[in-house]
């Protein structure tokens, strides 16, 4: 099992790096060879975005198919057949396209009417939109991919609600989703904002983990809310969004000249904005991961304190590691760039007091 987890993880890392390199090369070539200008001069923005998205998807299809379908089957983690996978790909594509239309339309509208402060205004809009999206995910997005139903195990439901009450957290209810139709991996989450907050358990977790193990998982999720980690992450992501747009504002004239573009307001320059975000994401990823790992560690500590279930925490981590083929002890560089949670062995050592 350890060898399989190592092979799976190393392949995922390599494919992730390849995917990032491919994205950058595609954007640079699309700009540099004039394809962006060609399409922008012949089509309106919605059609331009649709055409470019389809071209990117088709060229990237072999890598995407191997990464998200073949590899998962190779390591016996997926149960989806190709038609089911394609349906999910179509749904994801439509959602991404709609979100892209909203965000990019706002970008050009703000850029047109606020030539000097657009970077601050559009940052505010993107941040606001991400908050709205977080509220909609559990009620709109997740049901498109999985079937919801209220948690059928009343004993477990009662324990989860009692745990939420103990930690002074209000939840709408507890739900389970049919993960097992698509994957053998396990997951649980406390999602939503305001009146959409709810507990979601994958059936692959509900059916294979003890009540004590599930309780400590959800104590960890509740701890994020209790410790106000969401506002921290919102602040960090908002800060980096503002900084990235400000960098575009201050330096885009030089970058535009490299591709013979005259203005950021040209539709043809849109791939340049994406290049900025890809490169900026690479630079900031270690910092966001570091912050996230600290928050996850704090949530683990609170979960252990609230439940007092050290043994259940350790057994749960062992099961998750095996079920999800987790890299338990990654190389430090891998940890810096790819891990937004502490590695499994570090989390187990925390529970043991090492």
Image (spheres, helix red, strand yellow):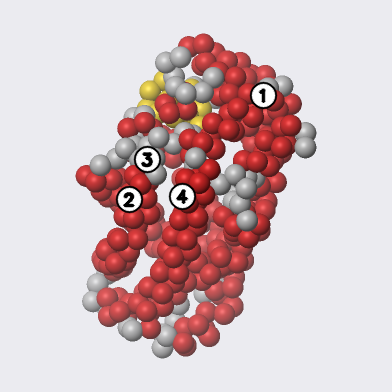
- Quadrant for residue 137, please give it: top left
Q: Which residue is mark 2?
A: 70
Labels 4 and 1 touching (C-beta < 8 A): no
Q: Can residue 64 be seen?
A: yes
Q: Which residue is mark 1?
A: 311
Residue plotted at (47% across, 71% down): 275
Could you tell me how far apart the alpha carbons at marks 1 and 3 are, in whole angstroms?
Answer: 28 Å
Kindly state the secondary structure of the residue where label 4 is placed. Answer: helix
Q: Quick check: 190 above or below 121?
A: above
Relative placement, left or right, of 74 versus 214 is: left
Q: Is 137 in front, or is 246?
A: 137
Q: Is 313 in front, or is 264?
A: 313
Q: Which residue is mark 3?
A: 76
Could you tell me how far apart the alpha carbons at marks 4 and 2 are, in whole angstroms?
Answer: 12 Å
User: Could you tell me which quadrant the C terminus lies in?
Assistant: top right
Kindly state the secondary structure of the residue where label 3 is placed. Answer: loop
Q: Is 117 in front, or is 219?
A: 219
Q: Which residue is mark 4?
A: 8
Could you tell me how far apart the alpha carbons at marks 3 and 2 are, in whole angstroms?
Answer: 10 Å
Q: Earlier in the sequence, mark 3 or mark 2?
A: 2
Kindly state the secondary structure of the residue where label 1 is placed. Answer: helix
Could you tell me how far apart the alpha carbons at marks 4 and 1 are, in whole angstroms?
Answer: 28 Å
Q: Position of residue 130 (x, y in %)?
A: 50, 50
- Farthest top residue in view: 155
Q: Position of residue 180 (x, y in %)?
A: 36, 31
- Farthest right residue in view: 354
Q: Earlier in the sequence, mark 1 or mark 3?
A: 3
Residue plotted at (48% across, 63% down): 17
């Amino acid at each position: 099992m350890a060898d399989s987890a190592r092979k799976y993880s190393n392949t995922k890392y390599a494919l992730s790096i390849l995917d990032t390199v491919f994205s950058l090369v595609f954007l640079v070539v699309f700009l540099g060879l004039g394809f962006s200008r060609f399409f922008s001069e012949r089509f309106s923005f919605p059609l331009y975005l649709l055409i470019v998205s389809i071209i990117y998807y088709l060229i990237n299809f072999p890598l995407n198919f191997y990464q998200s379908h073949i590899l998962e089957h190779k390591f016996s983690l997926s149960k989806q057949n190709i038609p089911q996978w394609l349906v999910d790909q179509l749904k994801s594509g439509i959602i991404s396209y709609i979100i892209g239309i909203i965000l990019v339309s706002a970008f050009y509208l703000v850029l047109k009417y606020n030539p000097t402060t657009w970077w601050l205004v559009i940052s505010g809009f993107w941040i606001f939109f991400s908050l709205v999206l977080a509220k909609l995910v559990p009620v709109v997005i997740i049901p498109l991919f999985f079937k919801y139903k209220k948690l059928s195990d009343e004993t477990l439901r009662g324990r989860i609600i009692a745990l939420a009450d103990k930690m002074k957290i209000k939840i709408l209810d507890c739900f389970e989703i049919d993960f097992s139709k698509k994957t053998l991996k396990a997951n649980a989450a406390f999602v939503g904002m305001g009146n959409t907050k709810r507990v979601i358990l994958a059936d692959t977790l509900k059916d294979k983990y003890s009540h004590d193990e599930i309780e400590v998982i959800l104590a960890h999720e509740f701890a994020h809310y209790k410790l106000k980690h969401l506002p921290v992450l919102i602040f960090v992501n908002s800060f980096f969004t503002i900084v990235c747009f400000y960098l575009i504002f201050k330096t885009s004239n030089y970058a535009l000249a490299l591709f013979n573009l005259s203005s950021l307001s040209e539709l043809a320059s849109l791939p340049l904005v994406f290049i900025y975000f890809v490169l900026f994401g690479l630079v900031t990823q270690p910092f966001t991961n570091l912050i996230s790992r600290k928050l996850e560690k704090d949530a683990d500590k609170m979960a252990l304190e609230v439940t007092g279930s050290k043994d259940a925490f350790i057994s749960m981590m062992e099961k998750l590691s095996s079920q999800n083929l987790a890299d338990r002890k990654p190389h430090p560089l891998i940890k810096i760039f790819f891990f937004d949670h502490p590695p499994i062995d570090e989390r187990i050592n925390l529970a043991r007091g090492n």
